[in-house]
Image (cartoon, rainbow, N blue to C red):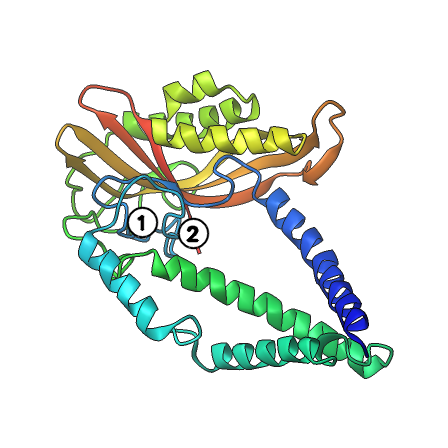
């Protein structure tokens, strides 16, 4: 096999990988089209890099922020960078044997391509096709491991440790409306910041109003409902939708269950992180034709931790959205 033939083989291999990966990426994008993009964004004051305590509504840990203006502490960030420099990618903690195998197989595949065999060698046989599919799967695993490593590298070492942060309110343990519709108001001990029934009503109202303003692409309205940081993310996501010729419509938002994770005060700012499980119709339409290109006409459910902030005597605003694992 001459160099030209090997080059064509490599190009065909990447074409196969892309043909499999692009529909998957589109499906993921469509599923996460609602406000916030299905990610974790925003700031929680000094607790941005601390996990909100788990609750009955959201018993699993909240995901760390992947978009935030807040900066982690310098010592923790320096420690993470030093660990990355020392261990390298495939030696990071948690990679283990899987990381080593992935690295070995990936290396073998790349070397095979360079020297005429590898990923496209003998593609005409059934066994070679199966081998190709296995190697594509390994590449996807490596990509996933790379994303996890990158996320760990940019999270402080002490972030998202088990148990509530110092001074945090304990998880809601039942009682009230926590096991059914609406917010649970019961708690085994008072939170550092007392949250009143009117506050819960404001949180539920904001859940619907933010989704409605997002669906209407009403940035001016979003500025009255969320912090400037969150509005900057929403604006960027809406601009991306326009680039894709899409419009995301969220409707029939209904709070099914919610409870307080923690509430606290920092200077003149109050914070409240609230776990909410809600149903909604989340669909993406082609702009101009209203052809359904993603999502569904039927209701789905989501569980997220929303953090709200307010200045003294001011109104609550959405300050962060975090997904749950």
Which residue is rendered at x = 71% and y = 79% of the image?
118
**At which x and y percent is residue 135?**
67, 74
Q: Residue furthest right?
A: 124
Q: Nearer the viewer, residue 38 or 77?
A: 77
- The residue that mark 2 highlights is 324
Give the secondary structure at mark 2: loop
**At which x and y percent is residue 311?**
21, 24
Q: Nearer the viewer, residue 161 or 245?
A: 245
Q: In the figure, is residue 189 to the left or right of 68?
A: left
Question: Which is more N-terminal, label 1 or label 2?
Answer: 1
Q: Looking at the image, is 170 positioned above or below residue 253?
A: below
- The residue that mark 1 highlights is 174
Which quarter of the image is occupied by the N terminus? bottom right
**At which x and y percent is residue 53?**
28, 52
Give the secondary structure at mark 1: loop
Q: Looking at the image, is 148 positioned above or below residue 271?
A: below
Residue 252 at least partly seen: no
**At which x and y percent is residue 147?**
48, 60
Kindly report the distance in space between the C-alpha atoms of the residues bearing marks 2 and 1.
Answer: 20 Å
Q: In the figure, is residue 325 to the left or right of 50?
A: right
Please rate how many residues cluster around mark 1, counting C-alpha atoms within 10 Å: few if below 14, some from 14 to 19, many from 20.
some
Which quarter of the image is occupied by the C terminus? bottom left
Q: Looking at the image, is 233 positioned above or below residue 101?
A: above
């Amino acid at each position: 096999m001459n160099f030209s033939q090997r080059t064509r083989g490599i190009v065909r291999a990447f074409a196969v990988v892309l043909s499999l990966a692009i529909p998957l990426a589109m499906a993921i994008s469509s599923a996460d089209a609602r406000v916030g993009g299905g990610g974790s964004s925003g700031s929680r004051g000094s607790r941005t890099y601390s996990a909100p305590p788990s609750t009955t509504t959201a018993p699993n840990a909240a995901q760390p922020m992947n978009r935030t203006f807040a900066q982690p502490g310098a010592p923790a960030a320096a420690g993470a960078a030093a660990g990355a420099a020392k261990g390298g990618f495939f030696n990071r903690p948690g990679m283990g044997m899987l990381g080593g195998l992935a690295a070995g197989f990936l290396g073998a595949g790349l070397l095979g391509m360079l020297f005429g065999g590898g990923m496209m060698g003998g593609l005409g046989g059934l066994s070679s096709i199966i081998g190709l599919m296995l190697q594509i799967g390994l590449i996807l695993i490596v990509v996933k491991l790379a994303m996890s490593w990158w996320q760990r590298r940019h999270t402080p070492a002490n972030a998202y440790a088990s148990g509530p942060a110092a001074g945090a309110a304990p998880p809601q343990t039942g009682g009230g409306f926590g096991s059914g519709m609406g917010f649970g108001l019961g708690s085994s001990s008072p939170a550092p910041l007392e949250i009143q029934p009117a506050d819960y009503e404001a949180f539920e109202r904001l859940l619907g109003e933010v989704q409605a303003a997002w669906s209407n692409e009403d940035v001016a309205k979003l500025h009255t409902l969320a912090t400037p940081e969150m509005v900057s993310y929403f604006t960027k996501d809406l601009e991306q939708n326009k680039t894709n010729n899409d419009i995301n419509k969220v409707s029939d938002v209904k709070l099914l269950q919610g409870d307080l994770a923690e509430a606290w005060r920092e200077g003149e700012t109050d914070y409240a992180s609230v776990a909410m499980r809600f149903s909604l119709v989340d669909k993406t339409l082609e702009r101009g034709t209203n052809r359904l290109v993603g999502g569904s006409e039927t209701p789905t459910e989501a569980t997220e931790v929303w953090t709200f902030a307010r200045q003294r005597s001011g109104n609550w605003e959405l300050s962060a959205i975090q997904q749950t694992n």
